[in-house]
Amino acid sequence: MTSTADTAELLRLYFIQQRTVNLPGIGSFELDRIPAQVDQVSGAIKAPSYTIRYDSMHDIPSKEMFAYISRKRNISEWEAIGVVNNFSMNLKDQLKKGQRFEWEGIGSLENSSSGQLIFDPVNNRYDFLPDLNALSTQSMSGEAVSTGDHHGAITWNDELVTVEARTSWWVAAAVIAAVALVMIFFNLIRNEYKLSGARDTNIVPSTAPAQFESKPAN
């Protein structure tokens, strides 16, 4: 028989792939992405992160989850349903005894004094997505850094990065230059076509005999 720890790990792997997992009698756990946020007061930029949302109302497992367990454990889908049901029953019994369940990669679950399930998600913030802290002091070179509308400075892993707030002018310049290049290229092609047509034109001599006007003798 599959242990509770083995089933918890298997469901965690399924959660990573599908971003959601539903347990009968427990509820659903869904991964939500929190976008980057800017502190309007300090100017600091909070890096994007992830959180796991718990909903006790959606506790019906999906057929895809049973198929996943069946494939990974090499058992029938009917047996996979039993694996999930046994895991949920063991989890509820543990919570009723006042024990806290630590689900690695998901979070912790425990019952409150009123019997309500409390879920504390894991901290899904990563070191490779650090926060950006705005600087209002002087830069490393000793030059003053303005935090007004024109310039700004931020730090990323304690390394100073100067950010020009108004650098969008080069976008318009690049667009104008691109349009000018296209027009020049089009004119070159058109002129080349005219020259080529002129070179290919054949002059056909007239077959009629030349007529000369006779002048009367003096």
Image (cartoon, grey):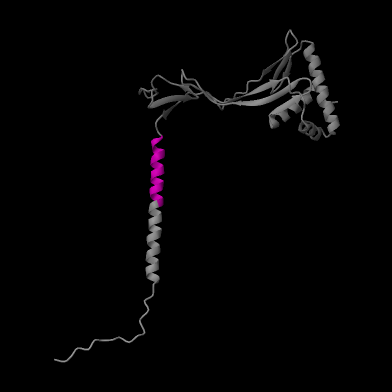
Q: Quadrant of residue 147?
A: top left
- Residue plotted at (63% across, 26% down): 32
Image quadrant where one finds the C terminus: bottom left
Please tell me whether residue 172 belongs to the stretch shown in magenta: yes
Quadrant position of the N terminus in the picture: top right
Q: Position of residue 131 (x, y in %)?
A: 52, 23
The span picked out in magenta is 168-182
Q: Quadrant of residue 8?
A: top right
Residue 137 quadrant = top left
Q: What secondary structure prevails in the magenta region?
A: helix
Image x and y of residue 87, in percent: 80, 22
Q: How many marks?
A: 0
Left or right of residue 24: residue 120: left
Compared with 201, 145 (above or below) is above
Q: Is residue 204 above or below residue 27?
A: below
Q: Residue 90 or 128: which is nearer the viewer? A: 90
Please state the horizontal and vertical placement of residue 109, each as a whole percent of the image.
72, 16
Left/right placement of residue 119 relative to residue 180 reads right
Q: Is residue 134 visible?
A: yes
Q: Looking at the picture, does residue 32 appear above or below residue 216?
A: above
Depth check, front residue: 77 or 133: 77
Which residue is at a point 41% across and 59% down the rendered structure image?
189
Q: Residue at x 39, y 44 (%)?
A: 176
| Left or right: 133 as drawn, with respect to 203 | right
Q: Residue at x 39, y 60 (%)?
A: 190
Is the residue 214 above or below the residue 181 in the image?
Answer: below
Q: Going by the image, does 13 lie left or right of 48?
A: right
Residue 3 visible in the shown view: no
